[in-house]
């Protein structure tokens, strides 16, 4: 950097301080609810921040971590995370059959998650309990921490059902919208016709529509669909209201405008000479797409898939109105806590549920940070 | 690409959009002029209560819905009512009464106008804040050491990626009752503070939440744009004696202008749909938005009825706003397309 562009110290300090301040604001609410969720209600809503962090009431109730727990636990966490990033990829590649690497990763990640929960919540508490008993003063709890709210949410309130519903809906949304969107994005990127332009403009208008407008259109049809479809399908005609697969179709459609815009900009970056060469060699458009484009399109597809995942996972409005209580996904289910949020215990359980919803997203950013950033910039910078 | 191949590629996506976006729009449009009600009939009911010597009997006329004997459901009729639903939503008579008597604040007592006021104000207040804060973070990150940038981007992405309802809840819990930040504020100012007892404090928190949630998006895009600033132009600006601020004003911001427009457009679209904050902050008693109004009409009331036609009317009114919002950018895109074609 030349001398002319060197910055005065005051500017550097200001910029650094601003950045630190922003990071504090960005992370604080999320970190804070994570801290609150492991404290007894009295500590979680204590007036002093120090009490919330150390949790004296939680500790007094016999739930706490000793120095040994903290040191060993952090060490264990460090090795677990390290192992996930160094050894796990190798294992997944070794054991997954060729061509099913994505499936292999899904199974690997699920197995890792299960093992992690088993060891950290099933085995280690007993080991540490025994250690603390013989360690004397080092084994006395110094930091209040309890997992009772998570147990209440996941086991007693059967939050795992909502989790499963969320997973079904998001998995469906991602798969279908990528399949449909990839084809459309490729077609739009390779066709310079006026029709393609108008389709994109219409998609842009559709993207701006408030979702409640669409749901107002679905509701009467979905509730009465059994009677409307009876002349065609007979007694098999389903009531679409409350069906997860109907929600998947709705969310895919809502997501389509965004998906095709994004995938189109990715496909435009793949040189058209590539599929022209395949066409010269005698491939049809579909063969060219399958043999030449598909192998190189994955970065764009993964990025778009992440954003489809976010849409399906984060949606409140559509799922709250079109799903009934049995098939409720996680985000609307948390609204159920508001209605009975009468005691502070209920409130902390709602906090624990909120943290449970956030945790997968946190992992997502950790693993896919680069893809998310490239996805955000793809639409804007490249036009 | 041949037209037929093009149709095969785009067909499935187009079909989904037509079936689940275009068709519902038409359906909403039609519904907004109709009203579906259960068919009512008046019947005489004799109710007897046991009494001494003789029963005490009273007859009264009750209005009850007719129940279809085959299906066991209530019979309904659908009637065309013209602009009745729109009138119910807009309540123009009350508006004119308020204008006539000079009490303009009375207009904001009506749900629709209250929602419109908040939605527009929300959109206009957060827009400059998001662009400004996003640009400042981008400049600061661009200034920071290379090793710091990765972690900072990671932390910055968290507010963006978090579920909107959960994000607003996490801020709600910091301020609710004697939440940690309310308690701190009370200690500083020495007075009792209730953040969720009046509309304006809730609105402030909502503005804060939206900026917190969207600024990372603006930041990432501006940051990518900053990487492509032409260094030669910047150096010649220095030689010409431009101060740091002038370089920012006359070189960097014009370079980022297309990105600023892009963010503004996306932000306008998303802010106009503001909804999740209302749920997260539980502000429906004080502050509501247009999309929440439709949501509320669609939610079954205590008797299990949904006000579908009023929801359709309020949805169509919301749509009018979208048209205004998109006219300018669409005209621009059309001109660019025409210009590019020739």
Image (tube, coloured by chain):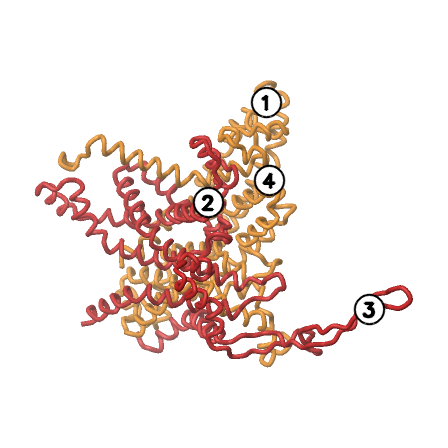
Identify the residue position indicated by label 2 in the image.
Answer: A363
Q: In percent of the image, x 33 and y 63: which residue is there?
A: B325
- Tell me, yes or no, whether the two marked residues, 3 and 1, touch with CB atoms within 8 Å: no
- Chain shown in orange: A
Q: Nearer the viewer, residue A137 or A191?
A: A137
State the CA–CA distance, disc 4 to disc 1: 30 Å
Q: Is residue B23 left or right of residue A190?
A: right
Circles 4, 3 touching at the beta carbon (< 8 Å): no
Measured as percent of width and height from the top left, residue A251 is found at 47, 62
| CB within 8 Å, label 3 to label 2 | no
How far separated are the C-alphas under marks 2 and 1? 32 Å
Which label number is shown at residue A344? 4
Residue A164 sits above or below residue B23 on the image: above
Q: CA distance from mark 4 to mark 3?
A: 48 Å
CA gap between label 3 and label 2 equals: 67 Å
Quadrant of the drawing holding the N terminus of chain A = top left
For discs 4 and 2, the disc positioned in front in the rendered view: 4
Q: Nearer the viewer, mark 3 or mark 2?
A: 3
Residue drawn 36% across and 59% down? B269
In this rendering, is residue A71 above or below B275? above
Q: Chain of mark 3?
A: B
Quick one: quadrant of the C terminus of chain A? Answer: bottom left
- Mark earlier in primary sequence (4, 2): 4
Report x, y in % for residue B299. Answer: 55, 62
- SS at mark 3 in the image: strand
Q: Residue furthest right?
A: B53
> Tag 4, which secondary structure?
helix
């Amino acid at each position: 950097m030349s001398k002319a562009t060197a910055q005065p110290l005051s500017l550097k300090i200001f910029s650094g301080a601003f950045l630190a301040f922003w990071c504090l604001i960005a992370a604080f609410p999320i970190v804070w609810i994570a801290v609150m969720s492991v404290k007894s209600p009295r500590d979680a809503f204590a007036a002093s921040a120090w009490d919330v962090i150390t949790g004296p009431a939680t500790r007094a109730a016999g739930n706490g971590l000793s120095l040994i727990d903290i040191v060993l636990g952090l060490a264990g966490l460090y090795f677990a995370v390290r192992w996930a990033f160094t050894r796990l990829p190798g294992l997944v590649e070794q054991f997954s059959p060729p061509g099913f690497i994505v499936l292999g990763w899904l199974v690997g990640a699920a197995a890792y998650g299960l093992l992690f929960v088993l060891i950290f919540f099933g085995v280690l508490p007993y080991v540490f309990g025994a250690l603390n008993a013989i360690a004397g003063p080092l084994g006395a709890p110094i930091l209040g921490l309890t997992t009772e709210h998570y147990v209440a949410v996941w086991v007693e309130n059967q939050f795992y059902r909502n989790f499963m519903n969320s997973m079904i809906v998001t998995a469906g949304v991602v798969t279908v919208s990528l399949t449909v969107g990839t084809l459309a994005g490729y077609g739009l990127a390779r066709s310079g016709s006026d029709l393609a332009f108008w389709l994109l403009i219409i998609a842009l208008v559709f993207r701006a529509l408030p979702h409640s407008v669409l749901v107002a259109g679905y509701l009467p049809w979905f509730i009465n669909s059994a009677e409307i479809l009876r002349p065609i399908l007979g007694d098999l005609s389903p009531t679409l209201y409350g069906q997860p697969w109907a929600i998947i179709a709705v969310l895919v459609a809502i997501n389509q405008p965004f998906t095709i815009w994004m995938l189109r900009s990715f496909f435009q970056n793949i040189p058209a000479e590539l599929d022209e060469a395949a066409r010269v060699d005698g491939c049809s458009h579909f063969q060219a797409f399958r043999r030449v484009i598909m192998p190189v399109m994955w970065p764009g597809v993964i990025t778009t898939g992440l954003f489809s995942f976010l849409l399906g996972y984060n949606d409140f409005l559509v799922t709250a109105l079109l799903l009934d209580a049995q098939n409720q996904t996680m985000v609307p289910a948390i609204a159920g806590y508001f209605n009975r949020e009468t005691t502070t215990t209920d409130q902390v359980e709602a906090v624990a549920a909120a943290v449970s919803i956030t945790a997968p997203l946190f992992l997502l950013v950790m693993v896919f940070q680069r893809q998310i950033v490239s996805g955000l910039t793809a639409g804007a910078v490249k036009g | 690409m041949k037209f037929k191949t093009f149709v095969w590629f785009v067909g499935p996506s187009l079909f989904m959009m037509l079936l689940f976006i275009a068709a519902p729009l038409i359906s909403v449009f039609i519904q907004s002029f109709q009203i579906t009600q259960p068919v009512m009939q008046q019947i005489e009911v004799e109710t007897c209560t046991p009494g001494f010597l003789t029963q005490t009997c009273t007859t009264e006329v009750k209005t009850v819905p007719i129940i279809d004997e085959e299906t066991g459901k209530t019979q309904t009729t659908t009637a065309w009512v013209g602009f009745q639903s729109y009138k119910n939503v807009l309540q123009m008579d009350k508006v004119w009464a308020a204008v006539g008597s000079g009490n303009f604040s009375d207009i904001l007592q009506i749900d629709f106008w209250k929602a419109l006021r908040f939605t527009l104000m929300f959109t206009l207040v957060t827009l400059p804040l998001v662009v400004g804060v996003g640009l400042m973070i981008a400049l600061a990150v661009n200034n920071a050491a290379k090793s710091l940038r990765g972690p900072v981007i990671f932390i910055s992405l968290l507010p963006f990626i978090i579920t909107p309802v959960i994000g607003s809840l996490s801020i709600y819990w910091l301020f609710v009752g004697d939440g940690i930040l309310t308690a701190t504020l009370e200690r500083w100012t020495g007075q009792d503070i209730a953040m969720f007892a009046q509309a304006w404090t809730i609105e402030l928190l909502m503005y804060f939440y939206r900026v917190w949630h969207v600024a990372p998006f603006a930041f990432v895009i501006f940051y990518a744009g900053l990487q492509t600033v032409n260094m030669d132009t910047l150096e010649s600006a220095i030689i010409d004696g431009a101060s740091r601020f002038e370089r920012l004003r006359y070189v960097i911001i014009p370079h980022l202008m297309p990105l600023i427009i892009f963010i503004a457009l996306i932000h306008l679209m998303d802010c106009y749909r503001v909804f999740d904050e209302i749920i997260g902050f539980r502000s429906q008693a004080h502050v509501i938005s247009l999309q929440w109004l439709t949501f509320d009409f669609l939610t079954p009331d205590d008797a299990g009825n949904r006000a579908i036609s009023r929801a359709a009317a309020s949805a169509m009114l919301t749509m009018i706003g979208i048209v205004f919002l998109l006219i300018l950018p669409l005209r621009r895109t059309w001109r660019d397309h025409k210009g590019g074609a020739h």
